[in-house]
Every structure is written in structure tokens, then in C-alpha cells.
């Protein structure tokens, strides 16, 4: 698990670990790995976009919407542009009246 990793692990490693967990069908563990990545690189909104995608896939629409809002808070207009390009968020954007 990611809890056993030392504190100086590069953020990219957490992305790799999350990908492995996703391939194994372990969405919750993938999200936890990405959250650890955010802790090492808090200005990287891409971690949040990946988490929102996982949450949406799990049917956690409200959590996904909140995570996308957090991504926009962190990444501003650049994050907003990325969200608009990502097809998996199209339906969620249509339902929401938030910033994304």
C-alpha cells in the first residue's frame, strides 16, 4: 500500500501506483495513491482531475463535482480548460451550475 512508502517519493510514482490499482479494479486505493501525490505536489491539479474521474466512474457524482471545483481552485483557467476537454465530465458539466 502507499501508506508504507517513504515520505520522499516523487509525485509521478503515486500516479503509477494509482494506475496499477485502477487496472486491478481497486478504485479506492487508486484515489488514496493520488491523494498522496497531491500531498507531494499540491499545485498539480491533474491529480484532482484523475480523482474526479475515479469518483465519477464509481457513481459518486457529488464527490466528483466537489473535486472538480477543487481542481479549478488549484489550477484556475488552465484546469477549467482541461475539464472542458475531458469527455467523461461532459454530462456532469451539463448538470452543474458551478465554475466548471
Image (cartoon, rainbow, N blue to C red):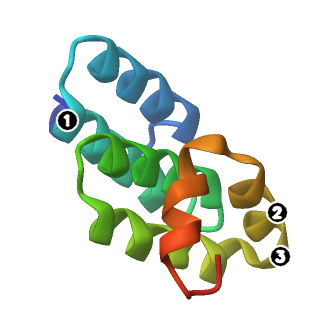
- Label 2 secondary element: helix
- Side of 56 where 41 appears, left or right: right
- Side of 25 where 65 appears, left or right: right
Tell me the tag on residue 76: none
Q: Position of residue 23 (x, y in %)?
A: 32, 12
Disc number lying in front (2 or 1)? 2
Q: Residue at x 18, y 40 (%)?
A: 28
Tell me the tag on residue 29: 1
Q: Residues within 10 Å of mark 1 (few under 14, many from 20)?
A: some
* Contact check, label 2 and label 1, Cβ < 8 Å: no
Between marks 2 and 1, how big is the CA–CA gap? Answer: 28 Å
Judge whether residue 24 can be spotted in this image: yes
Q: Residue at x 65, y 42 (%)?
A: 87
Q: Which residue is mark 3?
A: 77
Q: Residue at x 52, y 56 (%)?
A: 91
Q: Earlier in the sequence, mark 1 or mark 3?
A: 1
- Label 1 secondary element: helix
Between marks 1 and 3, how big is the CA–CA gap? Answer: 29 Å
Residue 64 occupies quadrant: bottom left
Q: Position of residue 49 (x, y in %)?
A: 55, 53
- Side of 42 where 62 appears, left or right: left
Q: Position of residue 21 (x, y in %)?
A: 27, 21
Q: Earlier in the sequence, mark 2 or mark 1?
A: 1
* Contact check, label 3 and label 2, Cβ < 8 Å: yes
- Label 3 secondary element: helix
Q: Which residue is mark 2?
A: 81
* Contact check, label 1 and label 3, Cβ < 8 Å: no
Q: Quadrant of the N terminus?
A: top left
Judging depth in this view, the residue of 100 and 29 nearest the camera is 100
Amino acid at each position: 500500500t502507499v501508506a508504507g512508502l517513504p515520505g520522499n517519493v516523487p509525485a509521478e510514482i503515486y500516479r503509477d501506483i494509482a494506475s496499477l490499482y485502477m487496472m486491478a479494479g481497486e478504485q479506492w486505493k487508486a484515489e488514496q495513491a493520488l491523494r498522496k501525490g497531491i500531498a507531494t505536489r499540491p499545485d498539480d491539479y491533474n491529480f484532482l482531475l484523475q480523482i474526479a474521474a475515479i469518483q465519477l466512474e464509481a457513481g459518486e457524482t457529488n464527490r466528483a463535482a466537489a473535486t472538480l471545483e477543487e481542481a479549478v481552485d488549484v489550477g484556475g483557467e488552465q484546469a477549467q480548460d482541461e475539464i472542458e476537454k475531458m469527455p467523461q465530465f461532459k454530462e456532469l458539466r451539463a448538470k452543474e451550475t458551478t465554475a466548471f
